[in-house]
Image (cartoon, rainbow, N blue to C red):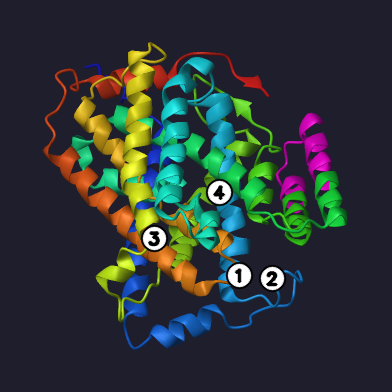
């Protein structure tokens, strides 16, 4: 009697692991944000704020002053978050969904319009108040973890092609957010420290070109780069993104995630810590807004209204308009197995700005804690509206006739064939 050999267990691809981790991390982020709101509106509110701003370290830079838990989270832990963002961006550019110009056509226009429209709406609603102008980038960002967590709750109501569209748009969105932070939210520059950061970066580039595949020299260099960037006046988190591009990658189109690739090894090592610790801790430390004494007039003030409208209206108009124009102009094809109503809902889902918006609000209004608190109200309102209404539409939207089986076809497109080669 002959027996059939057991079926080989299919290894999850990089994209599948990425979607799964972002979804789980996004759900945990929601819990952390809800916990922060509960604590901030409870008898523990004073202790919560006192603990976050308690001196907990030396003076690393004159600009920041003594380190506090809040500074360690926003300037330290978030540098690791941005390192992971940089690794994901590089992976997608060299070995993923954005590795060719043809693949970049569809998400590029929606991502750019999805940043421009929210900024324009914010600028319009806050016109006449110069102190608020610096916050124009707050509603321009998308929180991929939160958005993927919302999609995960919908299960089969959100086809894979929609998730891929969201991921692709959000990655380009992240590139734009990093550029904005580097260019527009950098004040005084320490030339000596900046030169040191550049020298360290050149050293990391040399290690890459010499094909050094061990991770520890890069990790040491990244630590030095972070400190030099912190001293330079450029926000320290930029060191994470720039440094990530110096990590060598080995492309493997036929088998995503080459085991020998330093980039993939580091990304996989960081992803659980970022998704399940760093981002939730950041959310808990920054989402605590007190609603005590809050009135409708406070919510409808120019700052929170501008941010909420930018996230809720600007994102859906920009992203959906970008997809529509790209498809109708022949630049790209509509994602398979989707309807225009589903694409519209995912465009609205891009209005969840949470993590990146909270981060930018702190950079936009340094030294103005009251304004930052007002900004948080707008971020929470715009993100909540975007999440609830988008998920409701996706839950009720009829499926496309060709949605059945499209995930298998899409997976075949992602995996593809090709020889493993070094970058």
> Badge 1 is on which residue?
71
Q: Residue at x 47, y 33 (%)?
A: 112
Mark 2 vs 3: CB contact within 8 A: no
Residue 370 lies left or right of residue 7; in this view the side is right
303 versus 11 height, above or below? below
Secondary structure at numbered mark 4: helix
Identified at 81% across, 51% down, the residue is 194
Q: Quadrant of the C terminus?
A: top right
**Mark 2 touches mark 1? (CB < 8 Å):** yes
Residue bounds of the magenta highlight? 200-220
Looking at the rendering, which quadrant does residue 382 occupy?
Answer: bottom left
Q: Quadrant of the N terminus?
A: top left
How far is disc 4 from disc 3 in space, using C-alphas?
Answer: 42 Å
The residue depicted at 83 percent of the width and 35 percent of the height is 206
Give the mark nearer the N terminus: 2 vs 3. 2
Q: Are marks 3 and 1 in contact (CB under 8 Å)?
A: no
Which label belongs to residue 64?
Answer: 2
Q: Nearer the viewer, mark 2 or mark 4?
A: 2
The numbered disc on residue 269 is 4
Q: Which residue is mark 3?
A: 302
Q: CA distance from mark 2 to mark 1?
A: 8 Å
Q: Nearer the viewer, mark 2 or mark 3?
A: 3
- Name the front one of labels 2 and 1: 2
Which is more N-terminal, label 1 or label 4?
A: 1
Asked whether residue 141 appears in the rendered view, the answer is no
First in residue order: circle 4 vs circle 3: 4
Q: Count the marks.
A: 4
Marks 2 and 4, the one that precedes in the sequence: 2
């Amino acid at each position: 009697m002959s027996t059939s050999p057991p079926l080989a267990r299919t290894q999850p691809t990089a994209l599948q692991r990425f979607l799964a981790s972002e979804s789980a991390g996004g759900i945990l982020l929601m819990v952390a944000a809800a916990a922060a709101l509960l604590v901030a509106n409870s008898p523990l509110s004073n202790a919560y704020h006192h603990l976050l701003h308690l001196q907990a370290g030396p003076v690393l830079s004159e600009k920041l002053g003594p380190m506090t838990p809040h500074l360690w989270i926003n300037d330290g832990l978030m540098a690791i978050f941005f390192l992971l963002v940089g690794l994901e961006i590089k992976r997608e550019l060299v070995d993923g969904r954005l590795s060719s110009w043809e693949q970049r056509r569809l998400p590029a226009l929606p991502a750019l319009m999805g940043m421009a429209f929210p900024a324009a709406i914010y600028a319009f609603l806050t016109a006449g108040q110069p102190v608020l102008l610096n916050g124009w980038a707050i509603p321009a960002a998308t929180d991929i973890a939160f958005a993927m967590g919302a999609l995960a709750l919908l299960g089969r109501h959100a086809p894979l092609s929609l998730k891929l569209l969201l991921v692709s748009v959000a990655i380009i969105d992240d590139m734009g957010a990093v550029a904005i932070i580097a260019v527009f939210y950098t004040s005084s520059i320490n030339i000596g420290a900046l030169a040191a950061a550049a020298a360290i970066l050149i050293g990391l580039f040399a290690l890459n070109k010499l094909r050094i595949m061990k991770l520890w020299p890069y990790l040491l260099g990244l630590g030095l780069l972070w400190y030099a960037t912190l001293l330079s006046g450029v926000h320290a988190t930029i060191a994470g993104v720039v440094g990530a591009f110096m990590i060598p990658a080995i492309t493997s189109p036929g088998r995503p995630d080459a085991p020998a690739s330093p980039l993939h090894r580091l990304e996989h090592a960081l992803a659980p810590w970022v998704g399940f610790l760093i981002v939730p801790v950041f959310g808990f430390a920054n989402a605590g807004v007190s609603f005590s004494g809050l009135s409708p007039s406070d919510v409808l003030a120019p700052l929170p209204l501008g941010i909420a409208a930018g996230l809720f209206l600007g994102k859906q108009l920009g992203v959906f308009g970008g997809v529509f124009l790209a498809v109708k102009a022949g630049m790209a094809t509509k994602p398979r197995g989707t309807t225009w109503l589903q694409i519209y809902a995912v465009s609205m889902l891009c209005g969840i700005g949470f993590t990146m918006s909270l981060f930018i609000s702190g950079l936009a209004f340094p030294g103005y804690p009251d304004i930052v608190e007002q900004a948080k109200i707008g971020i929470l309102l715009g993100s909540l509206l975007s999440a609830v209404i988008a998920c409701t539409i996706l839950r009720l939207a009829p499926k496309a006739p060709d949605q059945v089986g499209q995930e298998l076809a899409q997976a075949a497109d992602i995996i593809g064939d090709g020889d493993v080669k070094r970058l």
